[in-house]
Image: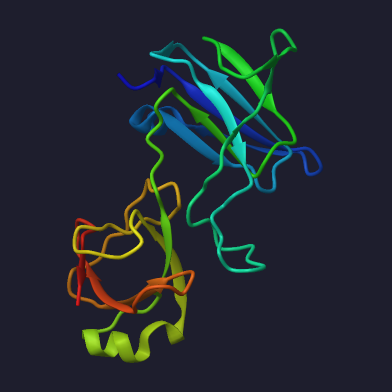
Amino acid sequence: MATSVSKLLIRLQKFSSKISRSIDATASFNEGGFFIQDLSGWDSAVVQFGTITDGPITFFTTNDDGARIIGQLLPAPEVIDQFLPVKGIDLSTKGDVLVASDDSIVEFGIIGKYLSLAGPEPAYPANYAYVISKNTFPTASEAYISGRSQGTTIVYATTSTLTSANLFYSTSALTQPIYGDGTSWYSAKRLDGTGPDYALQINGAGALYID
């Protein structure tokens, strides 16, 4: 059985501006046995764990966002990789820990760009960034001709090439599919410039139709 947790709450803090953001990552973690948090712009992350089943939950970090464009800072990553173990501070004992305990709170300060909380066999999804036209077109040929020159949006898919079985997602976490009307056409291409130009439709279930 995959590792699960009764509650997984993350509080991101930025000390200079005295702001914070709380995230309930319970459902996302239990779906795949892992959760990856982008720490960009935050000074620390405080993670609260409930009861852990079929654990343990181990901590990892990485700076590798899979970017293949020299000097690229944004948009968000294509494939997060090269995770290494990292220690957090258990706020009850003030000791360094590599794994979570039941009903514990662990703080992570200056680590890599990403924090991964993972069970023994996490199912990390591959994700690839695509540039898709902001505007839609009535025909595939118009999508090819006008394409992405009128503005673009960054979306994500689980494969390096597109097929009719793919979905597009709004974030690299692959949690929110993008839906269309099934009749309008978009232009799309891999963010790193590899692969073909696509003209495609997105239906009401999120499935892609490739011309």
Residue 132 drawn at (x, y percent) = 39, 72
- Answer with left or right where residue 206 lies relative to residue 45: left
- In this rendering, the count of numbered labels is 0
196 versus 110 height, above or below: below
> In terms of image quadrants, where is residue 181?
bottom left
Q: Position of residue 22 (x, y in %)?
A: 57, 34
**What's the colour scheme?**
rainbow
Tell me if 6 is positioned left or right of 16 in this view: left
Residue sitting at x 24%, y 89%: 141
Q: Is residue 81 above or below residue 152?
A: above
Q: Classify 131 as above or below 73.
A: below
Task: Give the residue at x 33% y 92%.
Answer: 145
Quadrant showing the C terminus: bottom left
Residue 63 is left or right of residue 190, and the answer is: right
For the point 64% across and 42% down, the residue is 39
Where is residue 157? Give x, y as percent.
Answer: 35, 57
Residue 40's x, y, as percent?
66, 48
- Indicate the quadrant where residue 147 lies: bottom left
Q: Residue at x 64, y 69 (%)?
A: 70
Which one is nearer the viewer's eye here, 177 or 100? 100
- As drawn, is 121 to the left or to the right of 43? left
**Closest to the observer: 84 or 30?**
84
Quarter of the image with the N terminus is: top left
